[in-house]
Image (cartoon, rainbow, N blue to C red):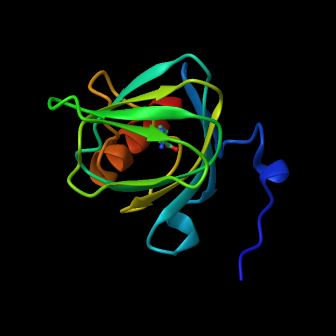
Amino acid sequence: MIVRKLKDILDTERDVKAPTWCSRRLLLAEDGMGFSMHHTVIYAGTQTHIWYRHHLEGVYCVAGSGSVELIPSGETFQIEPGTLYALNQHDEHWLRAETDLHLICTFNPPLIGDETHDENGVYASAEEFEKTRAAAMRADN
Ligand code: 9YT
């Protein structure tokens, strides 16, 4: 069994920080569950362009308020505690936070490490991520 506490991963390599959010990666691929699970905070007053071409993501709100707008249709859904949205079609979207938005996010396939969005709001596929990580390790040696 894996037991892990949020307080024990804060400010470690599992606490990934981006300009509009932080993502505390409670479960990653190496944990062998077949999905990753994160406690993510989207900062109040921000908007983030997201498009997970290589992943499916389920998002469950536990605190705060905001909205998700589908691109290109503009269809918008309010997010509040108790709301789930699932990007079951790799949906491109804007995520907006009115107050700090606390979200439990699950990814299939699981994230591997410190993935962050590229200029299109995309996380690299597992293959691309491992290739980049191996190249960075080679450059370090
Ligand atoms: C809800 C969402 O997609 N936020 C961006 C961060 C991402 N979910 C993550 O890696 O936790």
In the image, 110 versus 113, the foreground residue is 110
Residue 44 spot, x, y in % from top left? 62, 21
Residue 65 spot, x, y in % from top left? 58, 34
Q: Quadrant of residue 111?
A: bottom left
Is residue 110 shown left or right of residue 63? Answer: left
In the image, 92 versus 55, the foreground residue is 92
In the image as oriented, which residue stretches furthest toward the bottom? Answer: 1
Numbered marks: total: 0
The answer, for residue 62, to whether it is visible in the render is: yes
Name the residue rendered at 67%, 42% in the picture: 13
Which quadrant of the figure contains the N terminus? Answer: bottom right
Residue 100 spot, x, y in % from top left? 65, 29
In the image, 56 versus 8, the foreground residue is 56
Q: Quadrant of residue 128?
A: top left
Name the residue rendered at 24%, 35% in the picture: 75
Vertical comparison of 119 with 10: above or below: above
In the image as oriented, which residue stretches furthest toward the left? Answer: 72
Residue 116 spot, x, y in % from top left? 45, 34
In the image, 35 versus 39, the foreground residue is 39
Vertical comparison of 49 with 54: above or below: above
The answer, for residue 141, to whether it is visible in the render is: no
Q: Quadrant of residue 118?
A: top left
Name the residue rendered at 78%, 52% in the picture: 6
